[in-house]
């Protein structure tokens, strides 16, 4: 047994470690970044948990239990379960077959292109904008389609036959982004499938349907499971569509509690929602861990296509119909309504105007909201990329347990809903010692929120770019006498600029239309595009002005997407399609 070191030796050892860190700028930067990232997650979470469990002068679970057992809370919990299960099932039942049609069948190239474009639109378009469109189309009273059907079919009354506010409407309008993410994961799995086992099954006399059922689908079961978890996570964090359709789920319940000033209730629901989301994130991370999808290995052959015979045209039409319903119809509706004078006169000749766009360009509230969103998005994207450079370098180049832990901690924000994070930040910056910073009610707290929420989105493209670069280049630079900063500036930066650019654009796009956290954190003068659209839609300017703002925000997204394609080429579309994950 070794003798304990004397106090003087321990002091020298501690000092030498401190001296080593302080004398190495790279290690100091790594340490500061790690502490910053960990603090951004741990500190707000701790304040949130404290608010949920603090009762008088003691810590207790009673406040959380009381908040979660009220009749309204129980209703929201049941609604959330129904919503999550329904959206997940719809996503799997639509996304996986679509991926199979595009990747493994001989339907027309036009149909395949329509599906791919629709998926991209669904990924980058906030669900609440699509909901706005379908409210104008399928609203039970004045929805354009319902009005037309009542006239066509001679139906009496002023409601129906469709009702977008029903449970099927809520679930269907909550599914487009989840369907798109499910499609992307399933399509990638179908594309990677080696053909050998399918060919063997076919040689033994198995029908195409049996090969699909007994060979193909089992080979991608992990991808399907991962897609289901992504759908669950997305549904748990949903806010915009349920809010517009009046369907009370936990995220809406959080905001209602905050509006009433019931912080313990908001914190309690946020803690529960966060814990469930983190469990889902953990399961997802395990499902995509190394080897989870490597059920079999192949030699790079592309799987053969299933011939669909006469059904080819029916299936192709179904694929195009998906594109029409999920992208063309809602976006076209928003565009047309944005030129209406009044909703009541519909598509009549004298009901067209550009006044709604003039309102957006002249109204101080709208101008301020657009300016805030642009500034916040640019700031969040820039800070996120700077963080991911260091985090990406540590997790890719430093293969240790510590780096693996940092990699996991870095993606935790993906499992926290925007509403829960907003509540956590309010608890943090309205209590000491952070209260002295006076960030609550300012744009800065929104910037902090966006960085925490979206820097993991930028991390994956940066990590992927670094993985594609041999460490020999950096070692050669250091051997020539260059410092870590010099190597990073002259070698690493230029080689990973595509990943940095893609990460910046992804965070910018996500921040530009963020709603769930912004609607809780906003204050007088700090509205964003999304919160402004919601306010105008709810009566601050009318459906037409809200649609005009929605179209302008989508144009801004399209411009940034176009810049990304010009700068990075087709590879950027794949990165956007994957959501940066």
Image (cartoon, rainbow, N blue to C red):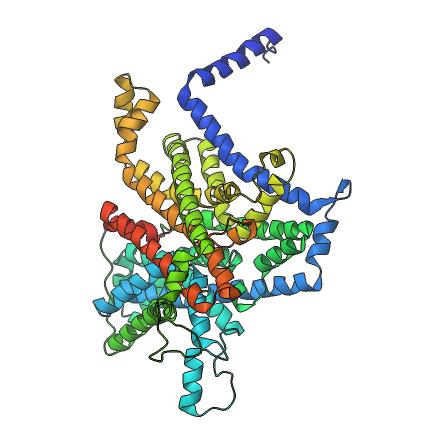
Q: If the image is split into quadrants, where does the N terminus sit?
A: top right
Expressed as whole percent of the image width and height from the top left, the position of residue 228 reads 46, 59
The answer to whether residue 315 is above or below residue 21 is: below
Q: Residue at x 58, y 37 (%)?
A: 438
Q: Residue furthest bottom?
A: 154
Vertical order, 48 against 577 (above or below): above
> Closer to the camera, 141 or 26?
141
Q: Is residue 18 above or below residue 130?
A: above
Looking at the image, is 159 positioned above or below residue 21?
below
Seen from this angle, which residue lies furthest front?
362
Q: What count of labels does the image hold? A: 0
Residue located at (43% from left, 74% from top):
342
> Which image quarter: residue 14?
top right
Please tell me which residue is depicted at 51% across the width and 49% down the height of the picture. Answer: 525
The x, y position of residue 193, in whole percent, is: 30, 56
Quadrant in the picture for residue 548: bottom left
Q: Nearer the viewer, residue 528 or 432?
A: 528
Taking depth in this image into account, of 443 and 252 the one nearest to the observer is 443
Q: Residue furthest right?
A: 57
Q: Decide if residue 571 is in sight here.
A: yes
Residue 577 spot, x, y in % from top left: 34, 54
Looking at the image, residue 7 sits to the left or right of residue 158; the answer is right
Name the residue located 70 percent from the left edge and 45 percent from the top edge.
Answer: 53
- Residue 67 or residue 524, whichever sits in front: 524
User: Would you say 297 lies left or right of 285 here?
Assistant: left
Report x, y in % for residue 411. Answer: 46, 43
Q: Is residue 90 visible?
A: no
């Amino acid at each position: 047994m070794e003798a304990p070191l004397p106090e003087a030796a321990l002091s020298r050892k501690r000092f030498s470690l401190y001296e080593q860190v302080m004398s190495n700028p790279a290690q100091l930067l790594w340490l500061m970044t790690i502490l910053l990232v960990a603090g951004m997650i741990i500190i707000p979470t701790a304040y949130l948990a404290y608010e949920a469990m603090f009762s008088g002068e003691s810590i207790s679970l009673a406040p959380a239990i009381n908040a979660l057992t009220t009749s309204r809370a129980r209703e929201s919990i049941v609604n959330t379960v129904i919503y999550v299960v329904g959206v997940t099932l719809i996503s799997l039942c639509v996304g996986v077959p679509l991926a199979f049609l595009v990747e493994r069948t001989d339907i027309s190239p036009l149909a395949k292109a329509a599906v791919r474009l629709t998926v991209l639109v669904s990924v980058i378009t906030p669900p609440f904008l699509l909901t706005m469109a379908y409210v104008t189309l399928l609203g039970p009273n004045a929805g354009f389609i319902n009005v037309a059907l009542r006239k066509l079919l001679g139906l009496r009354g002023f409601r129906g036959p469709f009702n977008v506010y029903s449970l099927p409407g809520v679930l269907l309008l909550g599914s487009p982004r989840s369907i798109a993410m499910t499609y992307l994961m399933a399509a990638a799995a179908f594309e990677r499938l080696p053909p050998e086992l399918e060919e063997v099954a076919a040689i033994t006399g198995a029908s195409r349907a049996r090969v699909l059922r007994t060979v193909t689908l089992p080979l991608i079961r992990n991808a399907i499971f991962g897609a289901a978890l992504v759908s669950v996570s997305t549904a748990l964090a949903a806010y915009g569509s349920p809010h517009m359709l009046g369907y009370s789920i936990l995220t809406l319940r959080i905001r209602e509690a905050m509006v009433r000033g019931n912080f313990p209730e908001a914190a309690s629901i946020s803690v529960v929602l966060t814990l469930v989301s983190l469990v889902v994130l953990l399961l997802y991370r395990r499902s995509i861990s190394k080897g989870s999808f490597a059920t079999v290995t192949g030699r790079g052959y592309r799987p053969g296509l299933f011939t669909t015979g006469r059904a080819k045209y029916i299936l192709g039409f179904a694929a195009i119909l998906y594109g029409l319903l999920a992208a063309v119809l809602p976006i076209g509706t928003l565009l047309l309504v944005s030129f209406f004078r009044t909703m009541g006169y519909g598509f009549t000749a004298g009901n067209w105007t550009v006044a709604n766009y003039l309102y957006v360009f002249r109204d101080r509230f709208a101008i301020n909201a657009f300016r805030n969103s642009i500034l916040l998005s640019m700031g969040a994207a820039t800070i996120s990329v700077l963080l991911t450079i260091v985090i990406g370098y540590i997790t890719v180049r430093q293969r240790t347990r510590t780096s693996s832990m940092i990699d996991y901690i870095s993606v935790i924000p993906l499992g926290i809903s925007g509403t829960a994070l907003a509540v956590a930040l309010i608890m943090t910056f309205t209590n000491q010692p952070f209260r002295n910073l006076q960030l609550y009610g300012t744009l800065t707290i929104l910037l902090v929120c966006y960085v925490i929420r979206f820097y993991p989105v930028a991390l994956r493209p940066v990590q992927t770019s670094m993985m594609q670069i041999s460490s020999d280049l950096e070692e050669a630079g250091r051997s020539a006498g260059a410092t870590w900063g010099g190597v990073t500036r002259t070698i690493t930066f230029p080689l990973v600029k595509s990943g940095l650019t893609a990460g910046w654009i992804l965070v910018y796009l996500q921040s530009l239309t963020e709603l769930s956290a912004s609607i809780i954190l906003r204050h007088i003068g700090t509205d964003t595009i999304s919160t402004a659209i919601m306010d105008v839609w709810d009566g601050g300017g009318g459906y037409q002005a809200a649609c005009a703002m929605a179209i302008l925000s989508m144009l801004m997204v399209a411009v940034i997407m176009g810049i990304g394609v010009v700068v990075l080429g087709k590879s950027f579309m794949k990165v956007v399609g994957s959501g940066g994950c």
